[in-house]
Amino acid sequence: MAIIEQAADELQALAASGPAVREAAPEDSGEAASWFQTAPMVIVLALFFGLPMLVVLVVSFFDFDRTDIIPTFILDNYVELFRSEVTLRLYASSLKFAFIVWAVTLVLGFNIAYFLVFHVRSLLWQIGLFLVCTVPFLTSNVIRMISWIPFLGRNGIFNQALEGAGIVNQPLEFLLFSDFAVIVAYVHLFTLFMVVPIFNSMARIDKSLLEAARDAGAGRFRVVAEIVLPLSRTGIALGSIFVITLVMGDSFVVRTMSGGQSASVVSALQNEVAGLQYPPAAASAVIMVIIVTLMVAGILRLVDVRKELAG
Amino acid sequence: MHSADDARPWTFYAFAAFFTLFVLFLYGPMIVIYILSFQGPSGGMTFPLNGVSLHWFGALISQTRVGDIAGSFVRSIGLAALVALVTVVLSVLAGLGFRRRFRGSAFAFYLAIASLIMPGLFVGLGIALAFRLLGLETSWYVSGLGAQLTWTLPFGLLIMFAVLGRFNRSYEEAAIDLGATNWQKLREVTLPMLLPGIIGVALFGFTLSYDELARTALTAGSENTLPLEIWAMTTNVTSPTLYAVGAVTTIVSFVVIVIALSSIAFIQRRRIRGARDATLASAE
Amino acid sequence: MDKPTGSGEVAVVGVTKRFGETVAVKDLSLTIPHGSYCCLLGPSGCGKTTILRMIAGHDKPTTGDIRIGGESVVGLPQVRRGTAMMFQSYALFPHRSVLDNVAFALKMRGAGLAERHGKARELLAKVQLEKFADRLPGQLSGGQQQRVALARALITNPRVLLLDEPLSALDEYLRLRMRGELRRVQKELGITFIHVTHTQLEAIAVADTVVVMANGRIEQAASARDIFVTPRNAYVARFVGGQNVLSGTVESTMNGTAAVASRNGARFAFPVDDPKPPRGSTIYGSIRRDRITIEKVPLGSKPPGGLNSVVGEVHTIENQGSYVKVTLDLSDSEEFVANLLDENFFKNPLDIGDRVVARWSASDVKLLDDGLGARAPIPAEAEVATAG
């Protein structure tokens, strides 16, 4: 038939026009190699992160009784969450902490990074001091958190020092088991997450830009505002994402340091888990993830972070 | 650049003072714990010190009163070593894979980042629920291991990105040019040159696992890791044993960190980077 | 050192290389004779490094073939190609000693420790670096590193050595010295050298054949002398330097000469051969910068007319040691440069702003290819005698 003949002709023409030598396509074999190399990690993450998160989503629609969870599809858990006043209060509390800690760690982190990048001249000192900041991060979080208790308590070092110096007559109560203590602990634990990305961003700034600005007459603070700050945007964004997600997702610090007076979304969630109320806990988790994702997306809108992460 | 005798601006001193305060802030409380761990036998949880003794360190070893410290300690070290090993292998492989552009690379990348940012308790909850639904028991070397990997693998990957970003590919091309097969190239050139970064990944893998709490809370099964034991102690122990535990565990961390960092320093020192500029005076 | 076996003739046959959307090399053909020194010369992005890497096997041609000693080497592993490459950054392994670096290729082929260290030391002695055998590359100066890179490449007895801008990492003094070294080594070994550079004078200094490239194509492949003295077109003339490019419309032709009128009224005589360019067409010619005489035009007097001369203002004066480079500002945008012998210049020195007339003789003008549509194109393959 004509159509077959036509197809045969076209195929023949195609074959005849091929290259005289093997066509080079190194990219193909490279792609397969990359798949093999990234597969193990992707599999582990999919199994222990992707899948479990899907499970959480699914369970959030389940029902439950005193002993077990019942697979079904109900929206009750979500309805409860949205109706309850407690939810609002918990989020207010978590967001409050997140915001305050973010602000404090930003100021601290920026200044520390600035000091290390622009004021420390010897590379050896830069690395050394950077390590000094980083090493505590690599030791136990729990220990670092509770180490504030003897420090801030009524009979703690700080109060004793204050009384000894005559600044106060009786110990300051608000230091421990209060919002103040919670914030202090968060700042202690998480400032490094702000320092590292900002340090990274700042280190990439060409120093001669600053000199050019000074040449053009900019004073010290103008140089920081006009040059350093904008060029560290990415680091600030990354650090903010880290700090905010860490604070929002925490339950241990807020429990311990507030002495049970304050709560966060996740600590309430932990209570539900302890009470075997998995579906509501799951629903709470899903809502939290959505809210935090929106916050992160908001931050990413302001800054393009991929370039920096991918080196 | 600055010459050695450039006067420093006043802001330097302001910053330096600020930095010192920050370092004190970081280390101060821990030092307090160390001091308090030497509390005398009749002393309490805070100052003043009633004598100096190793009494509370001794209390660590006797299991009955304070839970299973020794057991959880061994488990934590074992788990951390395992996590470090797995993290190194998987992160290095994946890091090498990400050097090329490939379909699905964006997915893999965002998967890792999401895993990094997700609150640990949620991941732990998810794994515990998944195991429950599948009828499996959680245990520290399966579900606990998996949970911790979701935290260490993204870190490892980011470190590999940083290290590979600085790695000049012409070394690998030179190796191929001189006749190396892919495997020889990896063994003789790529991996040895990446060794400092790989040690860094191992360091992070170990310490992040060793100190991990949130992810392991729901996935460790019936046998606790050390951080979980410590956490339990914070709520129901009223003696300085807790401080002794804190001192011991942080010392272990420090030892591991020092070993890793000195290995890196040692390796870097051996490979002096950068040629000195050719000068007329240098012996040609 | 043993001479390599097999011919080192390199033939690039109709090679095209695409990287995604960009075409780096367009249907390029080139034959480099065995044992010759060939320089690929051109600006960044012209495709010279791409060609080199394809000959080395680090990239594969999208279409076309590459043959060494007559056999196709596309897709062959390193061991079978007989090529070795010297990288621009040297790429010496920083974690291995100089000795281990040089011995690396032998280690890859499974040679024993004593054997490969022995051969490596021999080679290091040849480049006068035997004392540095146990040092790390980072402890050597740039020139020393380059010699190690050379030794490392030569240990495999390649038939073709590929050099990717080998001198650009060195400072000026070393660069000039090492040129001679490379040439000397090549002659001693008798193998083919292919050397990529963007420095015109370097290419002319070392090469038997210079291949001038632009935009993935060969503009001219000829001996170093021919490239300089008879550039094929305006691009080569301008890139290699040492020439001024003249252009204008043909007014008449007679007896192998064309009368040409330039845009701003100057009149030139170009030697032409058959087929004669038609009246009204634009043709181009080049005149060597050192075949020009300059005379001051006294203030107030009319600038002299005359064939084969231009009038202009002195724009810059650059002392180059044995000659002085005088750039003239003509009324059109073409740069016009005269290289005057230093004694001649300083006898009657010029100042910036002086009005001068530049003259040359018609027989020194060479016709360029541009604008000659009817002329048969000169084949771009290298047809050069072997080194000697």
Image (cartoon, coloured by chain):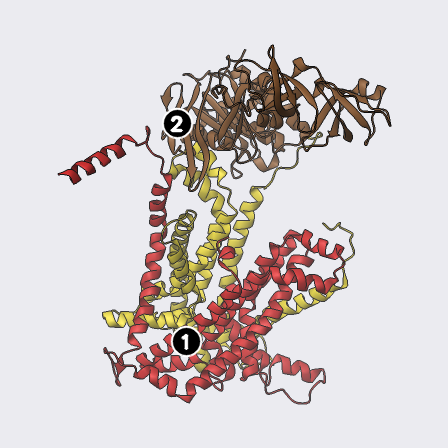
Q: Which mark is residue B241?
A: none
- Judging by colour alone, the chain drawn in yellow in this rendered image is B
Q: Are marks 2 and 1 on the same chain?
A: no
Viewer can see residue B50 = no
- Disc 2 marks a residue whose amino acid type is Val
Horizontal side of residue A175 vs B69, given as left or right = right
Q: Quadrant of residue A11?
A: top left
B179 w.r.t. B134: above or below: above
Q: Quadrant of residue A120?
A: bottom right
Residue at 69 percent across and 21 percent down: it is: C267
A206 w.r.t. C312: above or below: below
Using the image as rendered, state which of residue A64 and residue C302 is in the foreground.
C302
What residue does disc 2 label? Answer: C79
A146 w.r.t. C145: above or below: below
Residue A186 position in % (x across, y down): 53, 74
Using the image as rendered, state which of residue A100 and residue B250 is in the foreground.
A100
Task: Say what secondary structure mark 1 lies in.
Answer: helix
What residue does disc 1 label? Answer: A288
- Judging by colour alone, the chain drawn in brown in this rendered image is C
Q: Residue furthest left?
A: A1
